[in-house]
C-alpha cells in the first residue's frame, strides 16, 4: 500500500495537472493564428467587457496549475505530514480541479471570448468547474491511503527531579526546518519587493502587501517557548503573538507527534476540535492539557525535556511527589 501511494501520488498531483496544462497550451497555440490580436480578458460586475489583452497571455496561467500540483506533492510525499487518507485525497482533488480551472478554464474562456460579442462565458467556466470536480474526484479515488494512517498518541513523561526550593527555567524554540525557513524568507523578500514597486508605480495603498511579507518573515523565525514555575509562555516573532498558560491552569504535560496536514490542515497557529496548535513542522510536540479541557500542542525539538520540567513543577505545586534536598 505504501508503494502504491508513493507511486501514484506524483502521477496524480503533478502528472495529471501537467497533462491538462500541456493540452490547454497546445489547444491555444493551435488556435492563435485564427485569433484577433486582442481579446476580452476581464468583465465588470455587470458583465460588460472592460479589458483586453493578447490571447497568448493565457500561456502565463498554465505553469500555475503545475506549480500548485508540485506544492501539493511536496507536502503529501512526506508521510509525517499526513495521518489518514482524507486530507491527501482532498488536496489531490484540489490540485486537479485547480489545473482544470486555471489551464483549461482560462484557455477556453479566452478562445470563446475571441469568437463572441464579448459576453461573459459563464457556461465555459461552469463547464470547467464541473469537469474539474469530476476529474478531481476520480484522482482522489485512485489515491491509496498513506502508510501513516493511524491516530495520534500521547505519551506521559517522568518528572524532572527537583529540590524543594530549586528553581528551573526551560527555554526552547518551535521553528520550521532550514529549507522552509529559506523558502519563507525568499517569499517575504519577493512580496516586499513587489509591494514597493507597485507602491511607486501604481499607488502607495499597495504597501499593504508588506503585511503578508512581514508575516512570512516572522514565521521563518519560529516561536520561543519558556517554561517555569509560573507556567508556559509561547511567544511569536511579532509582539501580538503570545500565548500564556499559568501553571495553575495546567493539568498535565505530555509528548506527542503531529502530522500538520492530517491533524491541523496545515502549518502555523491552528485550532481544530478544541486543540490549539503551534505547528511549525511534523514530528515531536509538547502537549499541554488545561484544567478546562482545552489542549495546546507545540511542535518542537526537546519536547520530552519540556514535558518533564512541567510535570515536575505540577507535581511539586500539588505536593504529589517527594522533593530532593
Image (tube, rainbow, N blue to C red):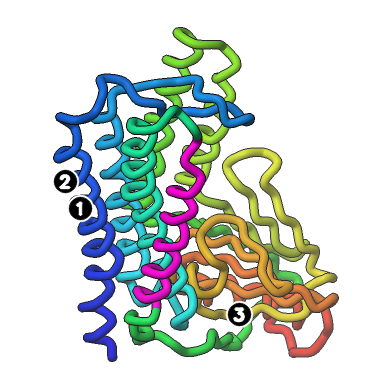
Q: What residue is drawn where x is 38% and y is 48%?
A: 105
Instruction: Check residue 27 for magenta coloring.
Output: no
Give the mark nearest the N terminus, 3 or 1: 1
Q: In the rendered view, would you say 213 is above or below 149?
A: above
Under tag 3, what secondary structure? loop
Residue located beneath label 3 in the image = 160
Magenta stretch secondary structure, dominant? helix
Magenta segment boundaries in residue numbering: 120-140
Return the x and y of residue 63 as percentages of the image width and height.
26, 44
Residue located beneath label 1 in the image = 23
Q: What residue is drawn where x is 37% and y is 51%?
A: 180
Judge by depth and name the residue closer to the eye, 219 or 117: 117
Name the quarter where the N terminus is drawn.
Answer: bottom left
Do tag 2 and tag 1 residues touch (Cβ < 8 Å)? yes
Under tag 2, what secondary structure? helix
Q: Quick check: 319 left or right of 124?
A: right
Q: Quick check: 171 left or right of 78?
A: right
Do tag 3 and tag 1 residues touch (Cβ < 8 Å)? no
Q: What residue is drawn where x is 66% and y is 69%?
A: 272
Q: What residue is drawn where x is 34% and y is 80%?
A: 143
What is the CA distance from the residue labelled 3 to the residue labelled 2? 66 Å
**Residue 26: mark:** 2
Crowd around label 2: few <14 · some 14–19 · many ≥20 (10 Å):
few
Return the x and y of residue 70 as percentages of the image width and height.
29, 57
Q: In the rendered view, would you say 53 is above or below 8?
A: above
What is the CA distance from the residue labelled 2 to the residue labelled 1? 5 Å
Amino acid at each position: 500500500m505504501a508503494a502504491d501511494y508513493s507511486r501514484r501520488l506524483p502521477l496524480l498531483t503533478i502528472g495529471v495537472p501537467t497533462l491538462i496544462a500541456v493540452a490547454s497550451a497546445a489547444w491555444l497555440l493551435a488556435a492563435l493564428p485564427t485569433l484577433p490580436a486582442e481579446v476580452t480578458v476581464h468583465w465588470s460586475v455587470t458583465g460588460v467587457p472592460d479589458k483586453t489583452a493578447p490571447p497568448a497571455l493565457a500561456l502565463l496561467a498554465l505553469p500555475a496549475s503545475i506549480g500548485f500540483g508540485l506544492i501539493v506533492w511536496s507536502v503529501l510525499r512526506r508521510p509525517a505530514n499526513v495521518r489518514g487518507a482524507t486530507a491527501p485525497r482532498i488536496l489531490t482533488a484540489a490540485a486537479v480541479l485547480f489545473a482544470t480551472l486555471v489551464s483549461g478554464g482560462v484557455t477556453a474562456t479566452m478562445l470563446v471570448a475571441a469568437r463572441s460579442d464579448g459576453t461573459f462565458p459563464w457556461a465555459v467556466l461552469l463547464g470547467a468547474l464541473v469537469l474539474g470536480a469530476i476529474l478531481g474526484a476520480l484522482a482522489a479515488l485512485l489515491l491509496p491511503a498513506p502508510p501513516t494512517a493511524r491516530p495520534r498518541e500521547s505519551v506521559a513523561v517522568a518528572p524532572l527531579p527537583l529540590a524543594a526550593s530549586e528553581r528551573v527555567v526551560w527555554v526552547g524554540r518551535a521553528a520550521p526546518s532550514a529549507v522552509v525557513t529559506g523558502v519563507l524568507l525568499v517569499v517575504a523578500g519577493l512580496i516586499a519587493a513587489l509591494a514597493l514597486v507597485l507602491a511607486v508605480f501604481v499607488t502607495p495603498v499597495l504597501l499593504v502587501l508588506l503585511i503578508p511579507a512581514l508575516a512570512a518573515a516572522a514565521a521563518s523565525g519560529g516561536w520561543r517557548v519558556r517554561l517555569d514555575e509560573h507556567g508556559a509562555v509561547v511567544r511569536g516573532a511579532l509582539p501580538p503573538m503570545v500565548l500564556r498558560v499559568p501553571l495553575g491552569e495546567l493539568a498535565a504535560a505530555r509528548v506527542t507527534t503531529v502530522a500538520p496536514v492530517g491533524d491541523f490542515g496545515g502549518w502555523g497557529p491552528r485550532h481544530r476540535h478544541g486543540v490549539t496548535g503551534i505547528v511549525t513542522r511534523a514530528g515531536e510536540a509538547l502537549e499541554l492539557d488545561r484544567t478546562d479541557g482545552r489542549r495546546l500542542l507545540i511542535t518542537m525539538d526537546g519536547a520530552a525535556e519540556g514535558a518533564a520540567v512541567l510535570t515536575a513543577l505540577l507535581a511539586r505545586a500539588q505536593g504529589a511527589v517527594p522533593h530532593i534536598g
